[in-house]
């Protein structure tokens, strides 16, 4: 599926959605085991890293509105993976926290992601892995700066 003499930008444009689709396809497989959607998995990961987040922080992290993130959190509440509580200092602020079941699911997701990454990286040499990580970090930093 290689295109000869393609500019790097053209190759990237062609490959990026294909890679994203394949990664998402694999993630959906292990997320389905615990009946977790991709946005829910992202929220679990963020809460695992930060401990507690406001609904506003979650919406910002997911690049959506609070009204869009609320139904996702409602579903997670029903599954007993998170808890939601109003701030004692500011009643307008609603904080979300991971419950033990959510921590367990997040650990399983992390383990599955690591296994998937290990499997994908088997196709690369150690030098290619380091180069890939260096370039991925550089692209991420560029996008982060341009997003401000």
Image (cartoon, rainbow, N blue to C red):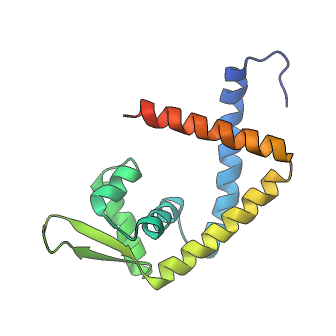
- Residue under the image location 37 percent in, 68 percent down: 73
Q: In the image, is 99 to the left or to the right of 142?
A: left
Q: Quadrant of the C terminus?
A: top left
- Residue 67: x and y, percent? 28, 56
- Residue 80: x and y, percent? 42, 82
Depth check: 113 or 25 in front?
113
Q: Quadrant of the N terminus?
A: top right
Depth check: 124 or 5 in front?
124
- Residue 32: x and y, percent? 62, 70
Residue 83: image quadrant is bottom left
Q: In the image, is 132 to the left or to the right of 35?
A: right
Q: Is residue 22 above or below residue 48?
A: above
Residue 70: image quadrant is bottom left
Q: Is residue 56 above or below residue 7?
A: below
Depth check: 21 or 147 in front?
147
- Residue 50: x and y, percent? 41, 66
């Amino acid at each position: 599926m290689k295109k000869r003499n393609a500019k790097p930008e053209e190759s990237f444009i062609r490959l990026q959605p294909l890679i994203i689709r394949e990664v998402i396809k694999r993630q959906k497989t292990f997320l389905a085991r615990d009946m977790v959607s991709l946005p829910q998995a992202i929220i679990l990961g963020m809460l695992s890293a930060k401990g507690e987040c406001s609904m506003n922080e979650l919406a910002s992290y997911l690049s959506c509105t609070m009204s869009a993130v609320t139904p996702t959190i409602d579903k997670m509440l029903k599954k007993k993976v998170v808890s939601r509580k109003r701030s004692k200092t500011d009643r307008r602020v609603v904080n979300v926290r991971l419950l033990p079941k959510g921590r367990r699911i997040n650990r399983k997701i992390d383990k599955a992601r690591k296994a998937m990454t290990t499997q994908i990286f088997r196709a690369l040499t150690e030098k290619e892995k380091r180069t890939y990580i260096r370039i991925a970090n550089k692209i991420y930093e560029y996008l982060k700066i341009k997003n401000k």
